Image (cartoon, helix red, strand yellow):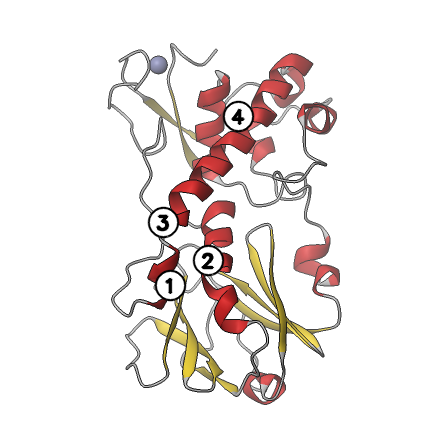
Amino acid sequence: MPELPEVEITRRGIEPFLVGQTLTGAIVRHRGLRWPVRRTLAAALRGERVRAVRRRGKYLIIECERGSLILHLGMSGSLRILPASEPPGPYDHFDLCIGEKVLRLRDPRRFGAVIWWQGDANAHPLLAGLGIEPLTEAFDGDALYKAARGRRVSIKQLLMDARLIAGVGNIYASECLFRAGIRPATPAGKVSRARCARLATALRDTLNDALAAGGSTLRDFVHTDGGSGYFQQRYFVYDRAGEPCRVCGRAIRSVVQGQRTTYYCAVCQR
Ligand SMILES: [Zn+2]
């Protein structure tokens, strides 16, 4: 599932092909994404010039003159820049047309979103309530400590709460808790100021390492035979239940927490 680093790498991959270009339309092959794609979308986009491609949390924002196209990759979505003549596959539900090229959304599970919004994208209800961007200066141990005060929810669920911190899901929450040596089930309100500081640093490091890993895949955004668009990474705990911890060798454990599987090392995380 794409989280902040995957979405940011996607943004960097597609940005050079979009900024300054004039959109020539859109092809909607399946309207039934997370929310129905508007029938009038192609007409609304035609003739719009792209000013910028931004990211907020897990959302991509293609900023045009009269509005913004807001994209979300859902559970399994990926984007590619392709020649318009490239035949679409069964999961290629949406094309944004840019002359001879298209920005193509492949979304097997159809949890993605394609929304045209007139006006400031940050004011859209999906974006307006998003929390701090963890890679900005506004995010640090104190911000995390403040957000966690009096909260009985687990520290892992707090990290994944988009209203507090934008863009962090199961993978990066699990990984940064391992790096910080904190048990995922610890009540957020019980994590000390010093441990919050360590966790904030661990989250930034985890996200930055993922961005570095993804940097080598940028050219894949123009490959017709590209896979999911997600880069391979070597996780410490995520999806490694039963495998030996890379630090202490003990088997990684998994538990279900808030309907999501959480992975941790019972020795390294206290
Ligand atoms: Zn361990």
Q: Is residue 87 left or right of residue 210?
A: left
Residue labelled with disc 3: 216
Whether the residues at callouts 2 and 4 have beta carbons within 8 Å, the answer is no
Residue labelled with disc 2: 10
Residue 252 % position (x, y) = 31, 21
Query: Which comes sooner in the sequence, label 1 or label 3?
Result: 3
Whether the residues at callouts 2 and 1 have beta carbons within 8 Å, the answer is yes
**In front: 22, or 58?**
22
Query: Which comes sooner in the sequence, label 2 or label 4?
Result: 2
Few, some or many C-alpha atoms within 10 Å of disc 4 (few <14, some 14-19, many ≥20)? many
Amino acid carrying label 2: it is Thr
Few, some or many C-alpha atoms within 10 Å of disc 1 (few <14, some 14-19, many ≥20)? many
Query: Which comes sooner in the sequence, label 2 or label 1?
Result: 2
Q: CA distance from mark 2 to mark 3?
A: 12 Å
Query: Which comes sooner in the sequence, label 3 or label 4?
Result: 4
Query: Which comes sooner in the sequence, label 2 or label 3?
Result: 2
